Image: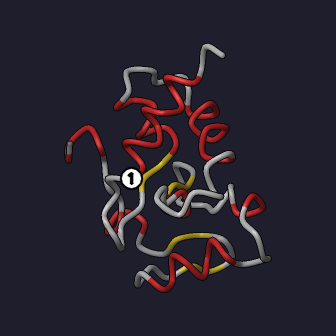
Amino acid sequence: MASTGFFEKVYEVTKQIPYGRVTSYGAIARYLGSSGSARMVGWALNGSNENPDIPAHRVVNRNGMLTGKHHFQGTNLMQQLLESEGIEVIENQIQNFEKFFWDPTKEL
């Protein structure tokens, strides 16, 4: 499968998102030099939520919406994980998104 290398790179970046911070699918794609591949980043993370070493709950869409939440077990698991890290979520939207946003292009 050609995308396996890309998926592994997505996992490596995702593992580096600090506790209490979030990033977007697009920011990871840009960091990996593939700015049009935000959806592919999402696909990679869909398959990772069984792996506790990959904090996929810290990756949201560019507006801070929890668009991947239906891939987590339990109705509100993604929100609960974020809130346990001090990130407020109201109606599937991260509050003060800019404050918590972590940009791998600047940070790595």
Q: Is residue 68 above or below residue 25?
A: below
Number of marks in picture: 1
Q: In the drawing, does residue 33 fall left or right of residue 5? A: left
Q: In the drawing, does residue 108 fall left or right of residue 27? A: left
In depth, the one of 93 and 8 nearer the eye is 8
Residue 105 quadrant: top left
The 10 Å Cα crowd at callout 1, few under 14, some 14 to 19, many 20 or more, is some
Q: In the drawing, does residue 11 fall left or right of residue 46? A: left
* Residue 82: image location, x then y, percent: 51, 76
Residue 87 quadrant: bottom left
* Residue 11: image location, x then y, percent: 46, 43
* Residue 42: image location, x then y, percent: 62, 41
What amino acid type should be assigned to the residue bearing mark 1? Lys
In depth, the one of 84 and 3 nearer the eye is 3
The residue under the point 52% across, 48% down is 62
The residue under the point 72% across, 78% down is 76
Instruction: Indicate the secondary structure of the residue bearing disc 1.
Output: loop
Q: Is residue 95 above or below residue 97?
A: below
Q: Which residue is mark 1?
A: 15
Which part of the image, by quadrant, shows the N terminus? top right
The residue under the point 51% across, 83% down is 83
Which part of the image, by quadrant, shows the C terminus? top left
In depth, the one of 64 and 10 nearer the eye is 10
Residue at the far top: name it: 2
The residue under the point 42% across, 66% down is 97
